[in-house]
């Protein structure tokens, strides 16, 4: 025992040492791959950003026509064109992600509270596996459901001829819309959020809940003020996961969003919700075959870089939001 | 260290609660070392609750077997007995917390000021009969919010900030905690010491002016000093609320209780004044228990 250095419980020998070396190498390898990927993406994206400057994020002209011009210039080996104003795509991403996450958060929270605290045992036994199953359904299946069910429903029942005519000069309304995208995306991300929320709420110590009940505060208020409050860091973590999935979702959104580089205009009233658009990730997906054209490739990588950066910012924001919650002793 | 005399008979022992008894009492030693901390009660005790022929079972296991006793304001009632004798279950049934366990079944009747408690709204009952648990369980909030939470939730309308401030301080002072936390009421409650946390829990239980205060081994996780502070507090409280305390610690029961109920295997073996139960127990089992022969 005396020979053991104080900092280590056991001296590393033989297989321990090998295991530590291998794990270390593995971690280093993973970090190196991540770093290389970041460098590669931003390097490829640079020409698009440097030509457009901050206008890249602005609006101006039809983004679809710009994409076409970028592609043709490279395809025909002309002078490369880079002009690209991504605002309609950014706006579409913000709208779809924001609305879906907002709705999913509220409904997931209530469902999770119900599952953990109020559902009878048999219902809990049914609900939990169903939620887990829903969380693992591939997005293309949600996309199909959208195309076959939600989009036709919106097109046939929610859009009148009159509203179609009122915006016909600029965009055609067919059911492929913001609404369809938001509805299906909500259904897609809610199960993930519910699963995470349930775990978090279940980890709240019973003694705190019991302490509150023993003071004559009813079950609902107790669970809301003690349970949900304590689980806030987990709610943040689950929401970050949901936003991440929503941001990165390409296939389903390409199928139902309408795939038009159009910025839905809130000024149009209720028609706003049935206007088509196309978010960033879906734009990459739909133009992925055109990577052979160098300016097109740089433009698509620029979009990818924006998505990567948003994802990183998202994790960071989640971390920042959790910090003040730790002060009173709640754990993530 | 002197040798403990060999025990007369050994029944399964309670696990010693953590750091030992409040004043280092050895099992088997006589109670003479324990000084009665309390002044004699005023003698104006009034009946608040009446436990009548109560049996409680978890599934098929009978935890409390036909127990009857009165609970009076102006006196401290201590429930003593070895682990698993049903004293905590009996205590929890007084504000219907046993109902949170789905397998629990209840027979008999408990009344509060003559009204059957099963006819009362559980939340209303639990505001009048509040409980402090064995492990301090302050909420993960600030000291201030721990009290304010109860006041806000129990108020019919949202209390004004100034009124809330005043009341929180009053309650903390009542539980003898104000001096220690006054400089920083925003301090996280979970970072207080164990004794302070438990006093905060008592303060919280007192916040809404309960009529009966239930304490489930409130000192078993605490050091001797905190224990003494809490015992003094309990004795002080007995004129304003009816106090029922479950304890493993015979010295503690001797120091603070006016009346003692000894339970064994779910039965109420003996109920009487503390002087009688400790000084001249009527039952053989009580005599063995209080002399430290078992548990």
Image (cartoon, grey):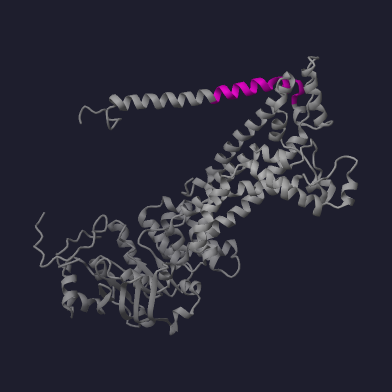
Q: Nearer the viewer, residue B136 or A137?
A: A137
What x and y, as percent, mark residue B277? 21, 77
Span highlighted in magenta in the image:
A34-53
What x and y, as percent, mark residue A167? 88, 44
User: In the shown orientation, is residue B165 left or right of residue B16?
Assistant: right
User: In the shown orientation, is residue B31 left or right of residue B96?
Assistant: left
| Residue B74 seen in the figure | yes
Give the total of numbered labels. Answer: 0
Say if the magenta span includes residue B268: no
Name the main secondary structure of what is drawn in magenta. helix
Please tell me whether residue A146 is drawn above or below residue A301 in the rendered image. below
Say if the magenta span includes residue A37: yes
**On the image, which quarter does residue A264 sit in?**
top right
Please tell me whether residue B82 is drawn above or below residue A239 in the rendered image. below
Q: Nearer the viewer, residue B47 or A252?
A: A252
Q: Residue at x 41, y 25 (%)?
A: A24
What x and y, as percent, mark residue B275? 22, 77
**On the image, which quarter does residue B88 sit in?**
bottom left
Q: Nearer the viewer, residue B244 or A266?
A: A266
User: In the shown orientation, is residue A173 left or right of residue B96?
Assistant: right
Q: Quadrant of the N terminus of chain A?
A: top left
What x and y, as percent, mark residue B250? 23, 67
């Amino acid at each position: 025992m005396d020979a053991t250095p104080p900092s280590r419980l056991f001296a590393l020998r033989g297989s321990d040492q090998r295991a530590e070396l291998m794990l270390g190498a593995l971690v280093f390898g993973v970090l190196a791959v991540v770093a290389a990927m970041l460098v590669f993406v931003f390097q490829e994206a640079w020409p698009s950003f440097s030509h457009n400057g901050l206008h890249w994020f602005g609006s101006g002209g039809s983004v679809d026509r710009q994409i076409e011009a970028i592609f043709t210039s490279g395809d025909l080996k002309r002078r490369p064109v880079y002009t690209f104003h991504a605002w309609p795509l950014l706006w579409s991403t913000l709208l779809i992600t924001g609305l879906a996450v907002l709705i999913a958060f509220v409904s997931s929270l209530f469902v999770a509270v119900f599952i953990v605290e109020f559902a009878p045992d048999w219902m809990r036994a049914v609900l939990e596996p169903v939620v887990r199953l829903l969380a693992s359904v591939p997005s293309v299946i949600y996309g199909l459901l959208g195309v076959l069910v939600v989009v036709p429903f919106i097109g046939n029942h929610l859009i009148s001829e009159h509203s179609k005519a009122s915006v016909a000069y600029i965009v055609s309304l067919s059911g492929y819309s913001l609404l369809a995208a938001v509805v299906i995306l909500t259904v897609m991300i809610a199960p993930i959020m519910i699963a995470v929320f349930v775990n978090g709420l279940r980890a709240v110590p019973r003694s705190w809940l019991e302490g509150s009940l023993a003071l004559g505060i009813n079950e609902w208020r107790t669970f809301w003020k003690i349970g949900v409050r304590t689980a806030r860091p987990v709610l943040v973590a689950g929401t970050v996961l949901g936003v991440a999935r929503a941001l990165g979702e390409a296939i389903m959104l390409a199928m139902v969003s309408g795939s038009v580089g159009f910025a839905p205009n809130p000024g149009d009233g209720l028609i706003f919700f049935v206007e088509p658009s196309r978010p960033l990730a879906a734009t990459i997906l739909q133009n992925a075959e055109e990577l052979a054209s160098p300016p097109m490739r740089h433009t698509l990588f620029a979009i990818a870089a924006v998505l990567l950066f948003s994802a990183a910012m998202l994790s960071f924001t989640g971390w920042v939001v959790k910090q003040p919650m730790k002060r009173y002793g709640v754990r993530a | 260290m002197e040798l403990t005399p060999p025990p007369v008979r050994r029944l399964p022992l309670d696990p010693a609660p953590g750091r030992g008894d409040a004043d280092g009492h050895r099992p088997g030693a006589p109670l003479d070392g324990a000084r009665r901390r309390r002044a004699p009660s005023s003698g104006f005790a009034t009946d608040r609750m009446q436990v009548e022929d109560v049996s409680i079972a978890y599934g098929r296991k009978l935890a409390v077997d036909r127990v009857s006793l009165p609970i009076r304001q102006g006196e401290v009632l201590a429930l003593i007995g070895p682990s698993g004798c049903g004293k905590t279950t009996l205590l929890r049934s007084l504000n219907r917390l046993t109902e949170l366990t789905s397998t629990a079944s209840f027979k008999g009747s408990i009344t509060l000021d003559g009204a059957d408690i099963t006819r009362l709204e559980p939340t209303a009952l639990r505001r009048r009969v509040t409980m402090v648990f064995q492990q301090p369980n302050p909420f993960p909030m600030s000291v201030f919010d721990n009290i304010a939470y109860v006041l806000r939730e129990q108020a019919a309308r949202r209390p004004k900030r100034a009124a809330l401030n005043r009341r929180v301080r009053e309650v903390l002072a009542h539980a003898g905690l104000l001096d220690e936390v006054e400089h920083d009421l925003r301090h996280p409650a979970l970072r207080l010491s164990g004794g302070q946390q438990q006093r905060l829990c008592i303060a919280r239980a007192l916040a809404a002016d309960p009529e009966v205060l239930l304490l489930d081994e409130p000192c078993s996780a605490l050091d001797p000093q905190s224990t003494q502070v809490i015992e003094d507090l309990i004795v002080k409280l007995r004129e304003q609320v009816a106090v029922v305390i479950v304890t493993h610690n015979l010295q503690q029961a001797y120091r603070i209780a006016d009346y003692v109920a000894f339970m064994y295997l779910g039965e109420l073996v003996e109920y009487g004044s503390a002087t009688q139960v400790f000084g001249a127990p009527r039952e053989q089992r009580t005599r063995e228990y209080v002399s430290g022969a078992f548990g």
